[in-house]
Amino acid sequence: SEEILRINGLSTRFFTEQGQVNAVEDLDLRIERGDVFGIVGESGSGKSVTARSIVDLIESPGQITDGEVWFNDPELAETVRDDQPEAVDGDFVDLRQLPDETRRSLRGTTFSMIFQDPESSFNPSLTVGEQIAEAVEVQQRASANPRSTRARTQSEEYSLGNFVLSTMLPSQKYVTEASRKRAIELLEMVGIPDPVERADEYPHEYSGGMLQRAMIAQALAGEPDVLVADEPTTALDVTIQAQVLDLLSDLQEETGMTILLITHNLGVIARMCDRVGVMYAGEIVERGTLADVFDDYVHPYTEGLLGSIPDLEDAGGRLDPIPGNVPSLLDHEMEDRCYFADRCPKAMEECLDHPPEYDAEGSDQHEVRCVLAEMAYDESRAVPDDWFATDD
Ligand code: SF4
Ligand code: MG
C-alpha cells in the first residue's frame, strides 16, 4: 500500500479571550491509502481539531498556524505543478500551500466528514433525498471543473449557521433526474429501507440511526478519497452503533476510501482500525498498528486508557479512569515537560526536564513520545523489562 497523507509539524491554535489555545501541537502523521486510522483520547485531547485540521475544516477563532499536509493525488499534482512547483513533491501536493478556493473545492469531493450529530448535517426544511442529490451535483460540477470555486450546499449553509438565508431561497428540487437516482442509490447503499419513498422524507422523519446512515450517504455522494468520522456512533445505542460501524467497514472495503476515525472509545478502535494514534494534550503520544498499541504499548497514558476498559466489546464504555484531567492547552500555561507527568504513575525527574521526542519502539511504524522509550534505546540505562509489562 502507499501513503495518502503525510503530515508534518501541523499546529492549530485558537485565539480566545483567555489567550492562545494550542489545540494541536507539532503533529506528524503518515496515513496509508485504504486504511482505517483511528485517533483515540479523552475529550479535550485535541482529536477533533486534529481531524479538522487535516481536512482543512478549522473555523475562526481557530487557525492552522504551521505545518504541511501532503496529499497523494497525481491528478491534482499535475494541475498544480506548473503554477506552484514548491507545493508539489512527486504525486503529493501540500494542501496548505494551495489557494483557499482550490482547497475548498476538495471538500466533499476529496475529503468528507461525518459527525456525532447527524441533525447538524441536514437542513430540516429540505428532504433528505434533495440534500443528497445536491451533494451529488456539487461533486459533478467540481469534477467537470476541478479548480472552480464551488458553492456551499444548502446543508452546509445550514451547518454553518446560515440557515435562515438558505431556507429563504427557493427550495432547490432535484436539478436532474440522474442526481435523484444517484441519491436513491446512495440511500440504498447505506441500508435505508424503501429508499425511493424515504428520499422524499424530511430529516425529522428519520430515526437517529437512519439519519446517521443518511449522513454517511451524503458524505459519500462526492466519492471522497478520505472520510473523516468524528465520534460517528457516540450518540447511538449500542446495537445501532455496531450496525453503523459494520456499514462503515463494508463501505470502506467496497470503495477503498481511507477513513480517519476519531473516538474516545477503544472498543470502536479495536473493531475498526488498522492503525491508531493515541492523543493527549494536543499531541499524538503513541502510534502504531492496532497490535503495537493494544499489545505492545509503551506509553503510560496508553496503558491507562487500556486498563480503563474492562470489556472492549462494550462499545458504550466511556474512558474516564485515569485520575486527573487533560491539562490546559493555554499557551502561557504550557510547560517544557511531558504534559502527562502530573498524572503519570511512572513519572521521574527526566520527565520534567524536556518534552519527550518520538522514539521508535519495536517496528519502525510504532513510535512513542515518552522518556521510557528514550531510555529503552540508551544501552547504558538498565530499564527493567517489567516497566513495559503488558500484564496478562
Ligand atoms: Fe510518564 Fe515520563 Fe513517559 Fe511522561 S515521559 S508519560 S511522565 S514516564
Ligand atoms: Mg470531539
Image: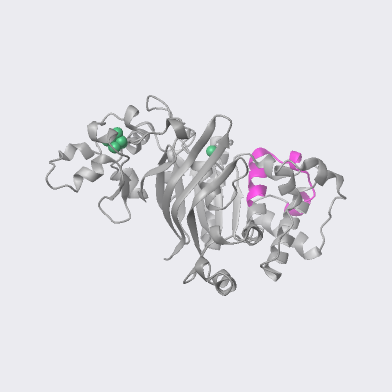
Q: Position of residue 270 (x, y in %)?
A: 41, 45
Q: Which residues are magenta?
A: 195-216
Query: Quadrant holding ligand 1?
Result: top left
- Hey, which residue is sitting farthest top in the picture? 323
Q: Residue at x 42, y 41 (%)?
A: 279
Q: Position of residue 21 (x, y in %)?
A: 51, 36
Q: Position of residue 28 (x, y in %)?
A: 41, 52
Q: Which quadrant, please, contains the C terminus? A: top left
Residue 294 or residue 189, whichever sits in front = 294
Q: Is residue 301 left or right of residue 379?
A: right
**Looking at the image, residue 315 lies above or below residue 367:** above
**Looking at the image, residue 154 lies above or below residue 2:** above
Residue 275 or residue 240, whichever sits in front = 275
**Looking at the image, residue 4 lies above or below residue 277:** below
Q: Is residue 352 left or right of residue 183?
A: left
In magenta stretch: residue 167: no
Viewer can see residue 319: no
Q: Residue at x 45, y 47 (%)?
A: 38
In magenta stretch: residue 214: yes
| Picture quadrant of residue 179 | bottom right
Viewer can see residue 98: yes
Residue 158 or residue 181, whichever sits in front = 158
Q: Residue at x 53, y 60 (%)?
A: 257
Q: Residue at x 59, y 60 (%)?
A: 110
| Picture quadrant of residue 61 | top right
Q: Which quadrant, please, contains the N terminus? A: bottom left
Q: Position of residue 112 (x, y in %)?
A: 60, 54
> How many marks do you count on the picture?
0
Q: Main secondary structure of the magenta part?
A: helix
Q: Is residue 2 left or right of residue 358?
A: right
